[in-house]
Image (tube, rainbow, N blue to C red):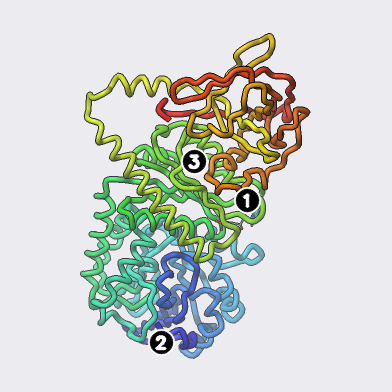
Amino acid sequence: MTATRPRDVQVAEVGENTMVLRSRTWDRLKFEVEYARQKGTTANTYLIQADRIAVLDPPGESFTEIFLKELSLQVYLQKIDYVILSHVNLNRAATLTALLERAPQITFVCSKPGAIALKAAFPDRELNINVVRGDEVLDLGQGHELQFAFVPTPRHPGALCTFDSATRILYTDKLFGVHLCDDPVFDENWKDLGDDRRYYFDCLHASQAKQVETALDRISPFNARIYAPGHGPVVRFSFSRLGLDYRDWCEAQKNQETLVTMLYASAYGNTAAMAGAIAHGLTEAGVAVESINCEFADPKDITSAVEKSDGFIFGSPTLAGHAPTQIQTALGLVLSTAAKNKLAGVFGSYGWSGEAVDMLESRLQDAGFTLGFDTLRVKFKPTDEVLNECETAGETFAQTLRKTRKTRTSVQPGLNVQGDRTEQAVGRIVGSLCVLTLNQDNTPVGLLTSWVSQATFSPPGLTIAIPFDQAEELLPQNGAPFVLNVLKEGRNVRRNFQKAIAPGENRFVNLATHPATNGCPVLDDALAYMECKVQNRMKCHDHWLLYATIDNGKVLEPTGVTAVQHRKSATY
Ligand SMILES: Cc1cc2nc3c(=O)[nH]c(=O)nc-3n(C[C@H](O)[C@H](O)[C@H](O)COP(=O)(O)O)c2cc1C
């Protein structure tokens, strides 16, 4: 990679009346994982000059100036009739704005979702938009009759491919591209492109292989001979080979034994970038991913995808203190239909408060789902480091899935069936999530437990069961005071008591507390608390059972709901 060369726009003829303008950068262009190889990229724009003039896909704002300068050397900007947008993203708005200033006559050609995104990007402007419908042909004259195919994917819901019958060039946008900056305009060195092409597919398309297959079906009737992608060299020499590779790579995804559904929404691309990196971690670990952009998904597609998956992962931005409605709807569907033995995961980008991710995490945990990686939260745009963490989280999720699959398959059918049934039956006993807090050597300590039950009326008393390995040295002695904090659904206090900490580290550093009258800490975020005294400790095989009397208690949030721990088995 030559990072020292300045950005430029390379111009070349690729067919009759047809040019490519390759806006080139030798640096990494964006933060998404597909650019992580840092080999630069080209943002390809195509110019067809027949009786009418069309420009396909002007580049993003980092090229606005140099691109328009080069374009104006090739064509009078005032003569451009159409700007065809294979997909619309906000990043292109700057170039389109500058172009419209010089060429206000332009008609945009795009899909319906593209038109919605375009209008949102230019809320104060009346645009000429030709929304492509069905079998429409856009005739530029001199045989350049343009036909279109809708190729929506979760990443690019409004994606459109364009075929020119005069040159038999198919403009494929995100299909058949590669992020690589080099001088050859065509792919004569296609043998050297293999790894990078595969990497691009794995990052961008592996998790949307189903939609890519549909796209391949839709474009095949065009009988094209050249693919003109949005990035990298124009595909002529490896035209058939790359088409077959795409089929094979999609097929390979279908043949994976383990499947995960990725459910996300993303208004500005940050959560989508995290989704891409997690999905890449999963596919690299041999797990197939079905990505669903909840903003454009049918409820029945969500339920059927989750039903056939071994796990699912939710990603959401926080907008105005909430997850977008589509994420809330998808969560409702999953909570009401998904089996509790599916592994779950949560991630998202936020700006300052991040309620959406907290809500997703607590609702899934409260419903009894186990999380396959520590929830990932990132402020605004993910950095390289965060994207690496996301990839690692995807790999961790895959390993956990494999382990559980192994455990499941290593149990022979019929063996210990009654034992399993009993475990599952006992697992249906639910308990309130509580944190037992006390002071030890003037340091606050806390234990998370859900095995709490009222035991007596007079005096008011309760029992708590705590596993030996968890609590031996923290367990209060007979006569010792403690506080039992009842947690509230929707709060994340439990996280502080679930994570492993180093010796001497204090779990209470980031927790607001105040002392109860018995001196033990009360968690300010608790729903209610009780001041208790241990009356009896009993060893019961693998647990301590404490009986304690309640001296005092208070509800801190009268309208809150108790957080409840659901389990699928009684063995943990
Ligand atoms: C209209 C609007 C409202 C937002 N409200 C919140 C909010 O209440 N809390 C928060 O943490 N971030 C908020 N944010 C910041 C977004 O969560 C943040 O920009 C995030 O990166 C968006 O993720 P996305 O790119 O996946 O859409 C808001 C952003 C916008 C544009």
The quadrant of the rendered image in which ligand 1 is seen is bottom right
Mark 3 or mark 2, which is nearer the start of the sequence?
2
Look at 45% across and 22% down and name the residue there.
Answer: 428
Question: Could you tell me if the residues under marks 1 and 3 are in contact, i.e. CB atoms within 8 Å?
Answer: no
Q: Which residue lies furthest to the right in this view?
A: 517
Residue pointed to by mark 2: 11
Q: Is mark 2 within 8 Å of ligand 1?
A: no
Look at 55% across and 79% down and name the residue there.
Answer: 64
Q: Where is residue 337 in the image (x, y as percent from the top left)?
A: 43, 32
Residue 295 seen: no
Q: What amino acid is at disc 3?
A: Ala
* Element assignment for label 3: helix
Residue pointed to by mark 3: 330
Nearest to the observer: residue 152 or residue 36: 36
Mark count? 3
Look at 56% across and 53% down and name the residue there.
Answer: 377
Mark 1 or mark 2, which is nearer the start of the sequence?
2
Nearest to the observer: residue 477 or residue 176: 477
Position of the C terminus, as image quadrant, is top left
Nearest to the observer: residue 100 or residue 392: 392
Q: What amino acid is at disc 2?
A: Val
Residue pointed to by mark 1: 319
Up/down of 160 relative to 260, above or below: below
Cα distance between the residues tagged 2 and 1: 42 Å
Look at 39% across and 34% down and name the residue there.
Answer: 341
Cα distance between the residues tagged 2 and 3: 46 Å
Q: What amino acid is at disc 1?
A: Leu
